[in-house]
Image (spheres, grey):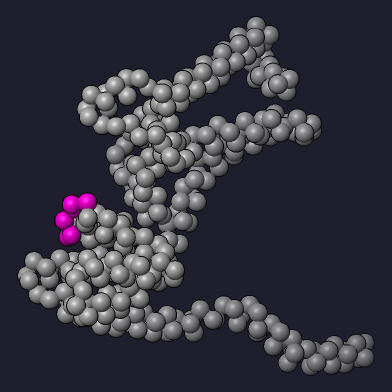
Amino acid sequence: MEYLAHLLQQLTGNTIAFQITFTLTIALAIFMLAMGILYIVSSFYSPLRKRLQTAGGQQVAPSSTLATSLNRAMAPLAPYVLPKKDWERSRISEQLVHAGFRSPGALTNFYMLKTVLIILLPLLVVLLAPLFPHAKLNHVIFAVSIAGFLGLTLPNMVLERMKPRRMRRIRNGFPDALDLLVVCSEAGLGLNAAIERVGQELEATHPDLAEELALVNAETRAGIERLDALRNLAQRTGLEDIRGLVALLTQSIRLGSGVADTLRIYSEEFRDKRMQMAEELAAKIGTKMIFPLVTCLFPGFFAVVIGPAALKIIAAFSGMG
């Protein structure tokens, strides 16, 4: 606290201005803390919300999970932390869904985490600054700026790394799921039963894809149309392969053709596509190996081949001198 007061005094340069700034800062911090506690308490224990839910014929169910409690606590703060632009919210929501965060409050929690990091990391730098007595004021300000920038960008960086990893896991499990769908449909199972069976079989090997298939079954049982549930699957995963399968199944169901034949044809085409992708990757290996060979193998090769001759030449010239 003494270091923070000294820092404010250096920034203001005047005793009266320092006292006013310090008092306003403490008052603002106490006010924000009180408002945050009030919002959290009101979100958990709101008599008005309970009476409105009771009047609407809904039962107030106690929150049994930490995620539900967190979503309810962060709901009042959503207008203050969410971006105003719809396209930005849609983009982050899509990335969260592709990364596996599908809860209603995932977007609010994400931006609340960014807000907390933007405040907490610079504050942590200020609190740790007394441990470095030789640090100048401009260095502290620069470190605070870097900490704030990290708090702003770090959640996006983590999300951008989590999204392709989950999409890669789902893509790796899709060929097995497609082959199992073909087997189940040709054995006489319907599409819903085949999806449920395949989801159960993939729980151990590909849990992400199994979870998505189980969600398709849950939406179908809840009354959502099967085509809409399949489109939701393609939207949640974000994979072109699944989107193509959903489009083909939609066309097959509308035209009345057999689902088993459609799945078998798509499986054969997808197998050819995978073979072409493997051949393309194999063809690129020669080009990609040039740089490791040049940087790692060729210097040692030249040293072994040319080294003895170079030593003899150096010895000959030294003998002539």
Residue at far left of view:
255
Percent x, y of residue 210: 36, 64
Is residue 184 in the magenta section? no
Screen quadrant of the N terminus: top right
Q: Is residue 226 above or below residue 285?
A: above
Residue at 71% across, 84% down: 300
Q: Is residue 255 visible?
A: yes
Q: Is residue 159 above or below residue 11?
A: below
Residue at 26% across, 59% down: 217
Percent x, y of residue 290: 54, 81
In the image, 60 versus 215, the foreground residue is: 60
Q: Is residue 93 above or below residue 259?
A: above
Percent x, y of residue 31: 52, 16
Total numbered labels placed on residues in the image? 0
Magenta span of residues = 222-227
Q: Is residue 182 visible?
A: no
Percent x, y of residue 251: 12, 68
The answer to which quarter of the image holds residue 129 is top right
Is residue 224 in the magenta section? yes
Q: Would residue 197 be found to the left or right of residue 309 on screen? A: left
Residue at far top of view:
16
In the image, 207 versus 82, the foreground residue is: 207
Most prominent secondary structure in the magenta stretch? loop
Screen quadrant of the C terminus: bottom right
The answer to which quarter of the image holds residue 242 is bottom left
In the image, 13 versus 227, the foreground residue is: 227
Q: Would residue 221 be found to the left or right of residue 199 on screen? A: left
Q: Is residue 146 above or below residue 235?
A: above
Residue at 41% across, 54% down: 99
Residue at 44% across, 41% down: 65
